[in-house]
Image: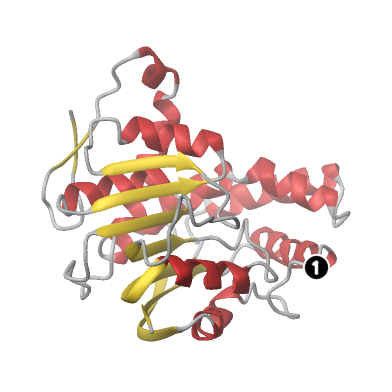
Amino acid sequence: MTPYTPHNGEQEQFPENTGSSLLEKEDEVAHLLLQHRQLSELMGGVLPPTLEPSWGSHVLVIGWSLGGLVYEMAWRYPSLQITGIDANARTVEVAQILAQDLDNVTVFAQDIHHLDDEVFPPASFDLIQLRFLAGNVTPQQFPPLMQSLARICRTGGLLVWTEAELPITTSLACQRLCTMVQEGLQASGRAFTPGYSLGVTARMGRWLADAGYRITQSRAYAINISVGSKGHDAFVRQVRLFAQQLRTFLLEQDVTTAEMFEEIYLEMQREIEEEQFCGLLYLRTLVAARL
């Protein structure tokens, strides 16, 4: 087992890279765990620190870093029965590798917009955890998704949901790319606000209230991504990870050209590594109770 030190200093154990299937994905698994660990440390844990696991035992996990989320939750709360779902087969495969030795985790491929009664009966879960869905769920899809999740969450059960906004930085190239992203979202009918901020965090509470949830906690995080901060390395990794996906999206929406994107992207990479680079990434986590 490979040790992992969470934010509280305890020694958690992640699986060794044994077996041919895991060896083939060693870099992907290691990268996922590092990303999850960094975010968990910056946010103070896999769940809000004030939230104690007295709400039940059946948990559903959806969203970014699925494998890291289900593994850390299973390790910290061994009495929980955790289900993780994602429509992406690759994401599910990596999560299954991480959970292969855990008796209290089930991970499988599932379209989150089609949670039928046979697989997910009403009131199946005591806690539903969501992270960073805005990249894959449109503003039009969020209301019915929240209604669907309310159906499978028991009365009094909790939903913990985290989303992020576009970063605010001193990099002109980074800000230009953020502007292009918003223009692309507007062109594709997927913008959350008419302005130049992403705006998803402002709408979370309304969607939850309309779905029959009562907000019990609202936590805001201003993650420092400046050079020399704990968040900077994670930010640089994310920039590199999503470069191709971002390029494809912007070209499809005819917001930029391949040549212009490469020029701006390379300039951003240079600027965010400069000693004077400063930036903040705003996150919001809501804890809501099912009425």
Image-quadrant location for residue 15 = top left
Up the image or down, 98 lies above or below 202; here it is above
Q: Residue at x 54, y 77 (%)?
A: 201
Estimate the x, y position of residue 252 in percent, counting from the top left: 84, 49
Q: Secondary structure at mark 1?
A: loop
Q: Relative to residue 187, is residue 278 drawn left or right?
A: left
Q: Quick one: 186 or 241, which is closer to the camera? A: 186
Estimate the x, y position of residue 205 in percent, counting from the top left: 50, 83
Alpha-carbon neighbours of circle 1 within 10 Å: few (<14), some, or many (≥20)? few
Q: Which residue is mark 1?
A: 189
Q: Quick one: 46 or 198, which is closer to the camera? A: 46
Image-quadrant location for residue 182 = bottom right
Up the image or down, 59 lies above or below 263; here it is below
Q: Residue at x 34, y 42 (%)?
A: 106
| Residue 173 seen | yes
| Residue 279 seen | no
Estimate the x, y position of residue 164 in percent, counting from the top left: 51, 67
Among all residues in the image, which is located at the extreme top? 20
